[in-house]
Image: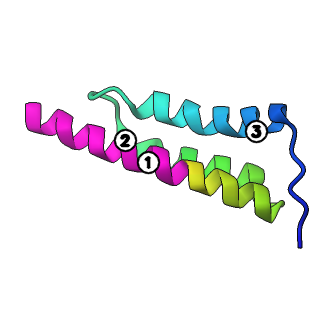
């Protein structure tokens, strides 16, 4: 089993990388075409450590789901 002994700073850095993507794509008028590239870049950054990668993917799922819900609400409001 892979050890998962990250420091608070490492968790902060992983979370911040995902947060930056969320923040970038939050505005209603932002171009979403580069979203897959940004997500891929973060995934590649952490891919070498399976447990770290798993954590980052979990964060990406949560933030992406929230973005999708926000974008849908923004569309409905016109």
Relative to 28, 65 lies left or right: right
Specify how the rendered protein is coloured.
rainbow
Determine whether the residue tagged by mark 1 lies in a helix, strand or loop: helix
Residue that numbered label 3 is attached to: 11
Q: How many marks?
A: 3
Q: Nearer the viewer, mark 3 or mark 1?
A: 3
Pick the front one: 73 or 39: 73
- Secondary structure, magenta segment, majority class: helix
Labelled pair 2, 1 in contact (Cβ < 8 Å): yes
Which disc is residue 67 wearing?
A: 2
In the rendered image, the quadrant that contains the N terminus is: bottom right
Residue that numbered label 1 is attached to: 64
Task: Name the residue located 86 percent from the left edge and 56 percent from the top edge.
Answer: 4
Residue 11, image x, y percentages: 76, 39
Label 3: how many Cα within 10 Å (few below 14, some 14–19, many 20+): some
Q: Is residue 73 above or below residue 1?
A: above
Residue 49: image quadrant is bottom right
């Amino acid at each position: 089993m892979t050890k998962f002994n990250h420091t608070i700073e490492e968790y902060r850095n992983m979370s911040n990388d995902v947060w930056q993507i969320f923040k970038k794509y939050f505005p209603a008028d932002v171009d979403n075409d580069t979203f897959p590239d940004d997500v891929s870049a973060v995934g590649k950054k952490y891919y070498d450590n399976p447990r770290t990668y798993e954590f980052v993917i979990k964060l990406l799922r949560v933030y992406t789901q929230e973005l999708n819900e926000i974008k849908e609400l923004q569309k409905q409001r016109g």
